[in-house]
C-alpha cells in the first residue's frame, strides 16, 4: 500500500520497522491525499488541551484481528478519516504490524503495545509507553530541561532537529517535524515543568498534550 504522506521529510521518527510478512492482513486505502508540505497546516499536529475527542471518534474503527495485527476498519467514515489524518495512523499500524510479525511486539486486547525484547529507547532515560493512538512519555525534571534545551536549539537551527528527536517519543509512520513545531513544544514543556518533570502524550498526527507531574 502506497500513500502520500502529508508531512515533508525533515528527520525520521519511526519505531524501527523490521521486515516481516503480514500474513493475511490487509489494509484499505482511502482517498485523502494532501499536497501540503508543512506540518503546521495539519490541524491536529499541535498543542491541544485534550485530544480525547479525536481518540474516541477513531477508536471504534480500530481493531486487532486473530493474528494479532492492528488495523483500521474500512467502514470508518470518510469525513473522520480525513479530519484526523487516519492515513498516518495506518502508516503507523503497518510498522507496528511488521514488528508483530517478527515477534518483537504484542498488540494487547486493550490495543496498547508491549515490547517483548529490550525496551525501546530505554537508554534515553525517560519512560515511554505505546498505545494504538501514539505514545505516553514521562520525563523527570532534569530530562525535561534537557529536552527543552534540545528542542529550543532545533527551533532556531534545522540542523539540530535530528538531535531534538532523541528526546521525543517515536511515532511510527510520521516522517518529519519542523523547527516551529520544536519551538512550540519546548515552550509548552517548559511552562508545565513545576520542578518534577512532565508527561507528554503524542498522537499519530503529532498532536500533543503536556501535563505537569
Image (cartoon, helix red, strand yellow):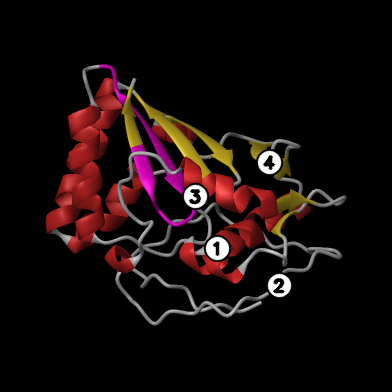
Reading the image, the residue beneath label 1 is 80
Residue at position x 79%, y 63% in the image: 22
The residue tagged with tag 1: helix, strand or loop? helix
Q: Name the residue under label 3.
A: 54
Mark pair 3, 1: CA separation: 9 Å
Nearer the observer, 54 or 19: 54
Query: In the rendered view, does 137 fall on the left or right side of 88?
Result: left
- Mark toward the start of the polypeptide (1 vs 2): 2
Residue, disc 4: 111
Bin the neighbour count of mark 2 within 10 Å (Cα to Cα): few under 14, some 14-19, many 20 and up. few
Label 3: how many Cα within 10 Å (few below 14, some 14–19, many 20+):
some
Proximity of marks 2 and 4: CB atoms separated by less than 8 Å: no
Query: In the picture shown, does residue 113 fall above or below 195?
Result: below
Q: How crowded is mark 4: few (under 14 residues within 10 Å), some or many (20 or more)?
A: some
Pinpoint residue 134: horizontal percent, then vertical percent.
Answer: 52, 46
* Label total for image: 4
Asked if the residue at tag 3 contacts the one at tag 2, i.e. Cβ–Cβ closer than 8 Å, the answer is: no
Cα separation, mark 2 vs mark 3, equals 20 Å
Magenta span contains residue 206: yes
Relative horizontal placement of residue 138, taking residue 15 as reference (left or right): left
- Residue 46 is at least partly visible in this image: yes
Query: Can you tell which of label 2 and label 3 is closer to the viewer?
Result: 3
Percent across and percent down for residue 45 are: 36, 57
SS class, disc 4: loop
The stretch in magenta equals 196-209
Q: Mark 2 points at which residue?
A: 28
Q: Counting residues from the N terminus, which is met first, the one under dot 3 or under dot 1? A: 3
Amino acid at each position: 500500500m502506497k500513500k502520500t504522506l502529508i508531512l515533508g521529510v525533515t528527520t525520521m521518527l519511526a519505531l524501527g520497522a523490521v521486515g516481516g510478512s503480514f500474513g493475511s492482513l490487509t489494509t484499505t486505502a482511502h482517498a485523502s491525499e494532501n499536497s501540503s508540505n508543512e506540518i503546521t497546516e495539519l490541524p491536529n499536529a499541535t498543542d491541544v488541551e485534550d485530544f480525547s475527542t479525536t481518540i474516541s471518534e477513531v477508536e471504534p474503527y480500530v481493531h486487532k484481528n486473530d493474528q494479532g495485527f492492528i488495523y483500521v476498519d474500512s467502514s470508518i467514515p470518510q469525513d473522520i478519516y480525513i479530519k484526523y489524518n487516519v492515513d498516518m495512523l495506518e502508516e503507523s499500524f503497518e510498522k507496528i504490524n511488521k514488528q508483530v510479525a517478527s515477534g518483537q511486539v504484542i498488540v494487547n486486547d486493550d490495543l496498547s503495545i508491549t515490547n517483548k525484547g529490550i525496551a525501546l529507547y530505554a537508554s534515553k532515560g525517560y519512560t515511554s509507553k505505546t498505545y494504538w493512538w501514539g505514545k505516553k512519555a514521562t520525563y523527570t525534571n532534569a530530562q525535561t530541561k534537557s529536552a527543552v534545551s534540545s528542542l529550543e536549539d532545533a527551533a532556531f537551527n534545522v540542523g539540530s532537529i535530528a538531535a531534538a528527536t532523541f528526546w521525543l517519543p517515536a511515532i511510527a509512520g510520521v516522517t518529519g517535524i519542523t523547527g516551529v513545531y520544536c519551538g512550540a513544544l519546548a515552550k509548552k514543556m517548559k511552562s508545565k515543568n513545576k520542578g518534577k518533570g512532565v508527561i507528554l502524550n503524542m498522537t499519530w498526527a503529532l498532536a500533543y498534550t503536556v501535563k505537569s507531574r
